[in-house]
Amino acid sequence: MKLSQFKFKLPEELIAQYPSDNRDECRLMVVDSRTGTIEHKVFKEILQYFDEGDVMVFNDTKVFPARLFGNKEKTGARIEVFLLRELNAENKFWDVLVEPARKIRIGNKLYFGEDDSMVAEVIDNTTSRGRTLRFLYDGPHDEFKEALYALGETPLPDYITRPVEPEDAERYQCIFAEKEGAVVAPAAGMHFSRELLKRMEIKGVERAFLTLHSGRGNYREIDVEDLTKHRMDSEEMVVDGNLVDIVNAAKDRESKVCAVGTSVLRGIASSVCMNGHIMTYSGWTNKFIFPPYDFTVANAMLVNFPLPYSTLLMLTAAFGGYENTMKAYDVALQEDYRFGVYGDCLLIVD
């Protein structure tokens, strides 16, 4: 397929700048991928579409406060540093993005905090904007991480144009988030409240977790028209034996397996073996999914409404079918659904 097939005009006012007041009270569009029929619901009504023995698979990754602002030595120039991942805990090496990158060279020192309490030295160039930093901090690693994160802010996507607020630290996170490592939140999972999870349990809908640390590559612009030439950034993921047992058993009894979010759908697809079941996996995935694609495990998915040209939209269209998905988008635009990570949600059932 072509990049231009995922173009549509999205009014800025439909890009959600804040989440709904309550996690489970956003709007929910339900699309039947076989018939193309569309229903409009409130998110907390989602259990109408699931029965005892069905499984929802969540991503339990945890977002950390990845965006820092510091100053360059001597010039005092303001620098944005976006933490991607820790490379070496003992030496406090971090893989980061810097802006403006042209000002940041190997050997430069960067100072963070009102009293310049945190100092980092640039020790390598990795990409045009990528750098490796060594943080110069005397003290235990846990103490260092606490101090570093205290200086950071929630890494909201760039299309949220307002300043970060304290409430974002809680809302840009799933309530079951546990394993730190993401800089992009699993948006569909953020709609689940404790009350809704309890109702799932009472109804007998199982839940299971994989871990996929979603990175900035989810928002990276695609610069090729031919999608077969696009390369995704690699993301670390873990599929453990408990998830494998739950999902494969559900598949065997022909229950629904719902991928809660694009990261979960990618994670499941990255761990499928030749017999159509999933297997344990711990490593990295750079799997790029776009139409057409044959999904052998998940037969339902939840996703927020991704923005035009995004790999998230392409993955959604691969699952729901291109025509059905773009039709759903037309309806969403007509009905003023809210788009983006803080927006409304789409359930696609097979």
Image (spheres, rainbow, N blue to C red):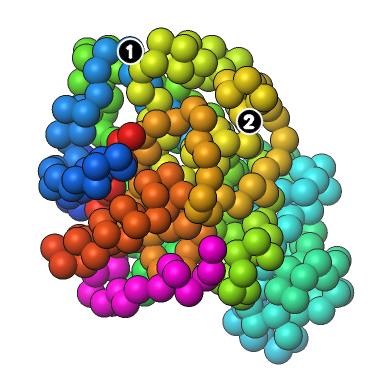
- When asked about the image quadrant of residue 139, the answer is top right
Q: Provide the residue span drawn in magenta.
A: 1-17
Nearest to the observer: residue 204 or residue 211: 204
Residue 34 lies, in percent from the top left, at 30, 40
Tally of numbered discs:
2
Kindly identify the residue that appears in the image at 58 percent across and 21 percent down.
Answer: 277
User: Does residue 326 appear in the picture of this structure?
Assistant: yes
Q: Name the mark on residue 271.
A: 2
Q: Quadrant of residue 115?
A: bottom right
Could you say where residue 282 lies in the image, as x and y percent from the top left?
Answer: 70, 30
Marks 1 and 2 sit apart, C-alpha to C-alpha, by 22 Å
Q: Secondary structure under badge 2?
A: loop
Residue 8 part of the magenta segment = yes
In the picture of the structure, the residue carrying the numbered disc 1 is: 53
Q: Residue furthest bottom?
A: 75
Question: Considering the numbered disc 1 on the image, is that residue within a helix, a strand or a loop?
Answer: loop
